[in-house]
Amino acid sequence: MDYQLAIENAPDTVPGGTGILLLHPSIGETDRIDTDFFKTDTDHFLIVSTRTTAREVEQKLEHYDVDESRADILDTLSVERGYSRWRTDNVHYVSAPDDLDGIVAQVTDFLESHEGKLRLSVDSVTELAYYADVDGAYDATRKLLDLLDKHDAVGLFHLSNEVHDAETIQRFRELFDGVVELDLDGGVEADF
């Protein structure tokens, strides 16, 4: 199954199983790329949030007019930080951003329990590497990409190109079918 992409300078469609790396500056405006990714040609999507809480993700979706009824959110921050949590059918939690096995298990559950065109966003791999380590984040990313392939889904994985050295960035690039680079001015380049 093919998925439409609404990403500037990227192909119009990509096949199921495609993983896309979004390289961006630390203060880069990734929200429009993320939300356009969800809005297009999607039955259900899961956001693995390692930078913001579920409530902040919901506010972003509302602000960008994304259909929240199709959204599931995995909040990796609220438990560790002691924030109040309201478990709902579409908001899930793991203990912390370094609970990589828990994150992979939640993504597996999402992909196995939904049908149709499924999308995944991991925002961000940089935070996974910060809380766990680069090798752990790399292994978890590889497992998530395997799941996308198995379930004919597509995914967008955020990685800050200012935080990691060139060798680490290249290591992650090689995992992905496509790389989208966002610059400070909002310009987008894509390599598929």
Image (cartoon, rainbow, N blue to C red):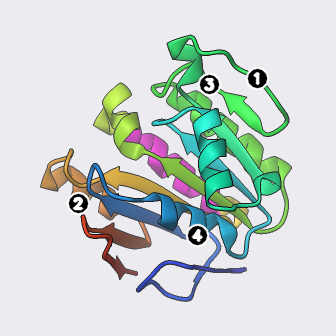
Q: Quadrant of the C terminus?
A: bottom left
Residue annotated with mark 4: 36
Q: Quadrant of the N terminus?
A: bottom right
Residue annotated with mark 2: 170
Q: Nearer the viewer, mark 3 or mark 1?
A: 1
Residue 135 as seen in the image, left or right of residue 112: left
Distance from the alpha carbon under mark 3 to that under mark 1:
13 Å
Which range is magenta? 137-149
Amino acid found under the numbered disc labelled 1: Trp
Task: Give the vertical position of 15 relative to 25 (above or below).
Answer: below
Residue 184 as seen in the image, left or right of residue 115: left
Residue 162 as seen in the image, left or right of residue 72: left
Give the structural element (helix, strand or loop) at label 1. Answer: loop
Q: Are marks 4 and 3 in contact (CB under 8 Å)?
A: no
Q: Position of residue 179 (x, y in %)?
A: 37, 71
Q: In this view of the protein, can residue 132 be seen by the observer? A: no
Give the structural element (helix, strand or loop) at label 2. Answer: helix
Give the structural element (helix, strand or loop) at label 4. Answer: helix
Q: Residues within 10 Å of mark 1 (few under 14, many from 20)?
A: few
Q: Nearer the viewer, residue 15 or 46?
A: 46
Give the structural element (helix, strand or loop) at label 3. Answer: loop
Residue 91 appears in which quarter of the rendering? top right
Task: Give the vertical position of 152 relative to 27 (above or below).
Answer: below
Amino acid found under the numbered disc labelled 2: Gln
Question: Where residue 94 is drawn, which disc sits there?
Answer: 3
User: In the image, is residue 65 part of the stretch drawn in magenta?
Assistant: no
Distance from the alpha carbon under mark 4 to that under mark 2:
26 Å
Amino acid found under the numbered disc labelled 3: Val
Q: Main secondary structure of the magenta part?
A: helix
Q: Are marks 2 and 3 in contact (CB under 8 Å)?
A: no
Residue annotated with mark 1: 86
